[in-house]
Image: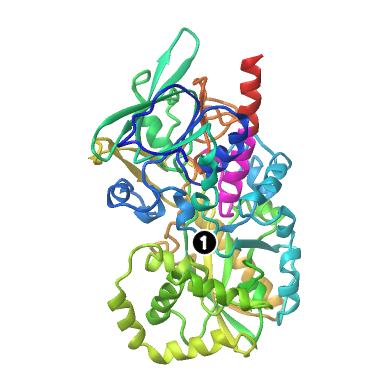
């Protein structure tokens, strides 16, 4: 098995392809290329498990409204897939269009039709079929609900997650059994060395530091950055031997147009009639998948109002909602994976969610589910909150027991406008390797905020018209802006486009002006839409692998 600790084994020879990063993007790409027979190196800053050294390298300096949490970036085999909930959805048609009302949008150089074949191929990486997102997967749950509403202005967007989540490092571990694929652990790439001839720039090696502060190099014919939405841009800015402003940064585009999906609770629905069942909007589990429908504006409504593609998620209010004891209990249950998976396999029908902590979203944000927990503190929190615990357990284990819901809280997810002022630069603070930390300035724009306000307004009108309830929301009056928690979706910074004056990579993900360097990950997104991005990231990785195979064949003939 070609798993190599770079602190103990110095790389030798010349690779055909060097993939930097072992998260969903890097491992999808490596898996797709493994059968090519070419010699491939995958470089990972961390180890198979988390380490204090690698965790310390996640630090970010925040200077804007949206704060990046260190736990949203992982340096470990499998990358962010070791902590995610695996929630997925494809981009919407409008996300890829050139929307003239965006101040700096040229749209994607790809269409949704271009992406669909790769979405379909992504099913081998733990994603549902593309056809599942047309609403058919939710049909049974929708029919079981107490109400459904239709509107010419609003539609439902399906989100589906593999349960348990797909860990790329575990699922694709066998890649490194191949004789031609090596994985280097404890190998932090600090910069890319390059050379310049009369017409073009070429990357020659990845410069590496070990936890012992030893220097290493890996050389290759072709390089792919797959280090995450922020680190891709940072590495380009740190690579300055042929350009003092950073590799591929001839036009000051690297690090610009950062985006995220700011999220948070705001808005209350008072239901006209208490609801007993609403699994497709409240969320449910079935046959190893979980999912729900979010609420967004129809494309035509977005175009006419000139707004972005945000969405709302229903969070039913139970007697135990926001209980710290429930949060602690769910964290402990999720740590006991064998028991949890056994219980889920025993469920033959639709299992309705009884708390949003069950999805992983709340747990990760408030308590850090994948971090170490204080067991004594958690058990004490459970003991002091026993009334809520008993009530939750009773309805959790009696899934068919009716539970009336009178009030629903809205969970908001925003699309952010790509603007150049939202950017990553290098700070004056250094990491353990002596490199400048990334400094992130990320702020919501007037259009970002207006888009969500308009969604609240139209949604409130529609539920009143359909006699479902009334929406209590004064979002347009609240200061400071309350939807400001980052979603761990680091997008933009090396955006894709045709014009080097406004983008960093072309439609084939090759860096403008650098002959043998490609970037794969959320950093290439020109716009973000409202969908969780990993599904699209893996689709782009499959597409890039196809392109690299063709490039190799061309070079050999």
What residue lies at 65% left-to-right and 76% top-to-bottom? 279
* Whether residue 504 can be seen here: no
Which residue corresponds to mark 1?
Answer: 85
Which of 293/377 is in front? 377
Which of 476/181 is in front? 181
* Whether residue 311 can be seen here: yes
Q: Is residue 315 above or below residue 319?
A: above
Q: Position of residue 97 (x, y in %)?
A: 66, 42
Which of 426/152 is in front? 426
Q: Give the color scheme: rainbow, by chain, secondary structure or one colour.
A: rainbow
Q: Quadrant of residue 329?
A: bottom left
Q: Is residue 258 above or below residue 462?
A: above
Which of 252/127 is in front? 127
Left or right of 545 in this view: 194: left
Q: Is residue 109 above or below residue 156?
A: above
What residue lies at 62% left-to-right and 90% top-to-bottom? 401
Q: Position of residue 102 (x, y in %)?
A: 57, 43
Q: Position of residue 286 (x, y in %)?
A: 66, 71
Q: Position of residue 524 (x, y in %)?
A: 53, 38
What residue lies at 60% left-to-right and 89% top-to-bottom? 404
In the current view of this chain or complex, which residue is farthest to the top? 198
SS for callout 1:
loop
Crowdedness near tag 1: few (<14), some (14–19) or many (≥20) residues, C-alpha within 10 Å: many
What residue lies at 66% left-to-right and 14% top-to-bottom? 557
- In the image, the segment drawn in magenta is 524-545
Q: Is residue 160 magenta?
A: no
Q: Is residue 539 magenta?
A: yes
């Amino acid at each position: 098995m070609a798993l190599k600790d770079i602190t103990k084994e110095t790389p030798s020879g010349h690779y055909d392809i060097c993939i930097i990063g072992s998260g969903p993007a890097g491992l999808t790409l490596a898996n797709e290329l493994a059968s090519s027979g070419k010699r491939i190196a995958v470089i990972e800053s961390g180890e198979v498990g988390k380490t204090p050294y690698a965790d310390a390298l996640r630090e970010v300096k925040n200077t804007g409204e949206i704060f990046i949490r260190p736990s949203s970036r992982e340096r470990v085999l499998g990358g962010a897939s070791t902590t995610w909930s695996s929630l997925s959805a494809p981009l919407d048609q409008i996300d890829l269009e050139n929307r003239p009302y965006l101040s700096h949008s040229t749209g994607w150089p790809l269409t949704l039709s271009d992406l669909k074949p790769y979405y379909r191929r992504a099913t081998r990486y733990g994603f549902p079929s593309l056809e599942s997102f047309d609403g058919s997967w939710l049909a049974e749950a929708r029919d079981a609900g107490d109400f459904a509403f239709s509107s010419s202005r609003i539609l439902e967007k399906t989100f589906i997650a593999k349960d348990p989540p797909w860990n790329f490092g575990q699922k694709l571990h066998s890649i490194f059994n191949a004789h031609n694929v090596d994985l280097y652990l404890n190998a932090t790439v600090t910069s890319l060395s390059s050379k310049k001839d009369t017409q073009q720039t070429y990357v020659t090696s990845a410069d590496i530091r070990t936890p012992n502060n030893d220097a290493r190099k890996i050389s290759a014919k072709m390089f792919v950055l797959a280090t995450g939405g922020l680190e891709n841009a940072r590495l380009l800015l740190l690579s300055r031997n042929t350009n003092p402003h950073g590799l591929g940064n001839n036009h000051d585009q690297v690090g610009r147009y950062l985006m995220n999906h700011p999220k948070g609770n705001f808005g209350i629905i008072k239901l006209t009639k208490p609801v007993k069942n609403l699994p497709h909007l409240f969320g449910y589990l079935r046959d190893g998948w979980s999912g729900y429908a979010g609420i967004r504006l129809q494309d035509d409504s977005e175009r006419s109002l000139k707004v972005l593609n945000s969405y709302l998620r229903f969070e039913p209010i139970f007697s135990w909602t926001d209980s710290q004891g429930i949060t602690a209990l769910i964290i402990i249950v999720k740590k006991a994976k064998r028991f949890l998976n056994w219980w889920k396999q025993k469920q033959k029908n639709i299992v309705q969610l009884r708390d949003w902590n069950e999805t992983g979203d709340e747990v990760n944000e408030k308590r850090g589910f994948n971090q170490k927990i204080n067991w004594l503190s958690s058990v004490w929190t459970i003991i002091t909150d026993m009334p809520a615990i008993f009530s939750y357990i009773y309805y959790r284990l009696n899934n068919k027991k009716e539970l009336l819901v009178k009030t629903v809280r809205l969970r908001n997810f925003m699309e952010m406008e790509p603007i150049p002022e939202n950017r990553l630069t290098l700070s004056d603070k250094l990491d353990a390797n002596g490199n400048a930390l990334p400094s992130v300035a990320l702020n919501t724009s007037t259009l970002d905020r207006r888009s969500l306000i308009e969604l609240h307004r139209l949604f409130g009108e529609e539920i009143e018209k359909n006699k479902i309830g009334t929406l209590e929301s004064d979002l347009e009056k609240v200061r400071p802006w309350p939807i400001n928690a980052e979603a761990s979706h680091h997008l933009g910074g090396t955006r894709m486009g045709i014009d080097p004056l406004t983008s960093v990579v072309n439609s084939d993900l090759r860096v403008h002006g650098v002959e043998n360097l490609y970037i794969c990950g959320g950093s290439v997104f020109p716009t973000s839409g409202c969908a969780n991005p990993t599904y699209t990231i893996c689709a782009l990785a499959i597409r890039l692998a196809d392109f690299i195979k063709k490039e190799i064949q061309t070079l050999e003939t």
